[in-house]
Amino acid sequence: MAVKSTLLPVLVGEGKLTQNQADEIVKDCEKRDIPIIQGIVETKLISSDDLANFCTEHFSLSLLNLDEFDLQEIPKNFLNEKLIKKFHALPVYLQGRTLYLALSDPTNLEALEEFGFSFGLHTEPFLVDELKLQKAIKILTDSVAEQLNVNDGLASDLDNMDSLEALSADDEPSEANNQGAAVETDSEDDAPVVKFINQMLLKAIQMGASDLHFEPYETKYRIRFRIDGILHQIATPPVNLKERFSARLKVMSRLDIAEKRLPQDGRIKLKIGPNKTMDMRVNSLPTLWGEKIVLRILDSSAAKLNIDQLGYNDVQKKQYLDALSKPQGLILVTGPTGSGKTVSLYTGLSILNDEETNISTAEDPVEINLYGINQVQMNPKAGLTFASALRAFLRQDPDVIMVGEIRDLETAEIAIKAAQTGHLVLSTLHTNSAAETLTRLLNMGVPSFNIASSCTLIMAQRLARRLCSKCKQVQDVSEQQMRAVGFTEEEIKEGIQLYGPVGCDACSAGYKGRVGVYEIMVMNDRIAEAIMNDANSIEINKIAVEQGMMTLRKSALEKAKLGLTSIAEVKRVTS
């Protein structure tokens, strides 16, 4: 092994490991050619956090939290990928003639010597958590590799690159595009850019990202992916390529390359396998330093999820299915952007979709195409709005209607009228809870008696990050913390076992995927009476809870009790 370490004897001497355990770690590390510190952490005999704290005290070193350190401030001239990976150390700060290295193993003196010799500088160590060091090295070496690949021709290491390029070759610019710009993006000089963009799109799909952000700034350019609801920086290519990046993405999505002053919307269709394609919704936005382009990955498989995969408990699942089985009424799904409302609606529509049912949807935009459902894309410039589409639907002999969002009184009144005249209507609103949805409709100007007589079910929802099943570990949470987050005394006495994130190669910071958190309010006589009496959202929520409604917080805590998510995530999504 290239990295020399004397940490194991120290741990054995302090009683942290036995000699047999140390010998096994050495054998494993030599066999796999990995640093000793990595082998220690992977055994889980000592957690990465405990090991960092022990080394801090024993070796009298300062502990640097890489999660709070801006990796973009790292001096790029010292990001030598070969040295970083060989000696498992990361240069983080240059002060005068002193280069500070982030090390998880304080006995790794070889790293200090080699970096000092290579750059002709004095070196000093900063102690860091091993898992955080692994994550930082991966982010930075990936970013550097991508920048070098852009300049050197970007030889792709992805096996299915050809299948993506084959489809991309078909995405010639539309007639509206500026032909000169189109010719420029297809030039030989831009071949590396084409390959780089393809690599980013495939990488996003492989990592399970929902959105890609291409962002230009004055002196930097960054690419971020939203994975499990959280943005992660993936690459920082040279800023002088920003025009080529935006031009290539606009060609692929059939946008007007010459138009750089106004926002534009488009789509990209990618073939990523023999029988699989992926749609992406694209939006360009002029910013101070160039065009920011955001791509939303539209995975049609998400719309075909079985209802059991969405995270409802047995009661909530029955409530939703009962509402869907009724021939008429209004089902409202509420929550912020990115909370999974579309998937919940599409799952409901998939359950209803059969030869005997006429289903029409008004969407802005149509995100996922579903066979058997008549989907209409809104076009306000042409006069096609939610309200006008709804009026047309009522003359199309519908059974089920889905409205993308109720944004105004006109749309709300038509939707309610349809629900009262023998149609099942599904829609969304942007409110924080089920009870607030009712008061939002009242504030729009919808009469209380219409709300009381048409609404059958209101579902507020969030998406919490799911703990990685491979590396999650039991978390020690005090009774005081459990009370503060919302657990009852009875639950605390039960001896609940809660889990927290760790982080491994199979996940992102200890999380992989997301799970739904739901608050479902079923309309009944008491709630209808409260609406008629102009009750506020707090009063309506109190009545619903008394009748058995599980709030968003309680639903999230239930997921934590099942080991699906962490207390930190419960607080984040239901604060």
Image: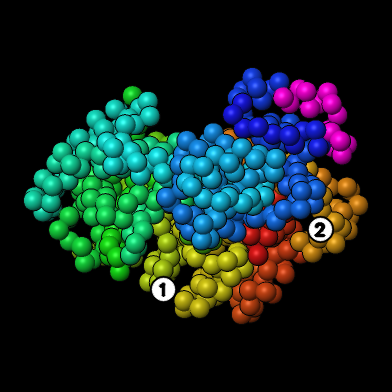
| Residue 229 shows up from this direction | no
Residue 448, percent from left and from top: 54, 75
- Asked if one can make out residue 87 in the rendered structure from this viewpoint, the answer is yes
* Residue 571 among those drawn in magenta: no
- Secondary element at image label 2: helix
Q: Residue at x 20, y 47 (%)?
A: 251
- Expressed as whole percent of the image width and height from the top left, the position of residue 539 reads 69, 74
Residue 171 sits in which quadrant? Answer: top left
User: Which label number is shown at residue 144?
Assistant: none
Mark 2 lies on residue:
482
Q: What amino acid is at disc 1?
A: Leu
Residues rendered magenta in the picture: 12-26
- Seen in the picture, residue 215 relative to 148 is either above or below; the reply is below
Amino acid beneath label 2: Met
Residue ID for mark 1: 409
Residue positioned 51% across, 72% down in the render: 441
Residue 296, x across and y down, in percent: 38, 50
Q: Main secondary structure of the magenta part?
A: helix
Label 1: few (<14), some (14–19) or many (≥20) C-alpha neighbours in 10 Å: some
